[in-house]
Image: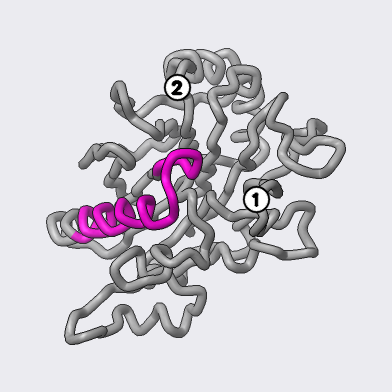
Amino acid sequence: MNIIFWNVKDNIKLVPYLPQLCKENNVDILILSELKNIEPEYVVRRFNESDVKFVNNLSMPGNRTHLFHSLDTQIKKIKDGKYFSAFKLKFNELVIILISLHLPSRLYRNDNEIGYKCVEIKREIELLEEKHNTNNTVVVGDFNLNPFSEHMVSTLGFNATMSKDVAMKIHRIVDGEKYKYFFNPMWTLHGNINNNVMGSFFYHKNPVSFVWNMFDQVIIRPSLIKRFNFNGLTLIDRIGDTTLLDKQGIPNAREFSDHLPLKFEIQ
């Protein structure tokens, strides 16, 4: 099951490229954020004009992410929050909870303020896992945090580790409290000089600058590590013959988006 997440930055000009993006990457689920003035129905119409047929799954006014898919299986929306949506689906005999999120913008919130939302959403996820009796959870979206940010790695936040071995311990105990792990595979892409890009978002204006940021991430529960295709994890910088980068090699915000699409696969 191939999934792409893309923060499209309300750029209607890139919508005609979506069918080709999904076709050449064999995408089953497409999650878009910052549609804003782009109607989900318009996206579906563009798909219907191609030979790639996708449907929109229960987008509601105010949703910060929108899910489109071509799966035969039913995808059921089980929760809507201000900054996330939760879906339940069956795939290869697994019951999976898929969380799509777009956390508050760094233009208006600092790391700690964004981190408070991580704490809230992590608790919502745990309640959903208890209710639906599964730990097969995938969280994908624009976190507006890097993999090393405090609330990505802290026990109060997502507790998302870079180590498979550590994640496979399932949880850790701090001050007598048990905290479940997420595994974060995005460390393999962030700063990787062998790739065309070293992050999903480029910003180099502040006095303290990481230059390439990995705000767009996927994290998974340890139960899905063996089903995660690490070779299929990629930041897409081209659709067909069209590059998504400008002449400086950074995301072309004018023609497409200042974020790059993130693709991953659950087998």
Check whether the beta carbons of the residues at disc 1 and disc 2 lie within 8 A of each other.
no
Residue 227 visible in the picture = no
Amino acid type at circle 2 is Lys
Which callout, 1 or 2, points to the residue nearer the camera? 1
- Numbered label attached to residue 206: 1
The stretch in magenta equals 104-126
Residue at 42% from the left image edge and 37% from the top image edge: 71
Residue labelled with disc 2? 36
Residue 222 in the image: x percent, y percent?
Answer: 38, 72
Which secondary structure, mark 1? loop
In the image, taking residue 150 as reference, residue 148 lies left or right, namely right
The one of 211 and 3 positioned closer to us in this rendering: 211
Relative to residue 231, is residue 234 depicted above or below? above
Q: Is residue 107 magenta?
A: yes
The label number, if any, that marks residue 175 in the structure image: none
Residue in front for this viewpoint, 90 or 57: 57
Q: Residues within 10 Å of mark 2 (few under 14, many from 20)?
A: some
**Which image quarter: residue 186?**
bottom right
Q: Position of 190 compared to 132: left or right?
A: right
Cα distance in 3D space between marks 1 and 2 = 27 Å
Q: Main secondary structure of the magenta part?
A: helix
Q: Is disc 2 placed on a helix, strand or loop?
A: loop
The number of callouts visible is 2
Tell me which corner region of the image, top left, top right, bottom left or bottom right, holds residue 120.
Answer: bottom left
Rendered location of residue 20, percent (x, y): 66, 29
**What's the image's color scheme?**
one colour
Residue at x-position 29% and y-position 68%: 156
Asked if the magenta segment contains residue 112, the reply would be yes
Question: Three-letter amino acid code at disc 1?
Answer: Asn
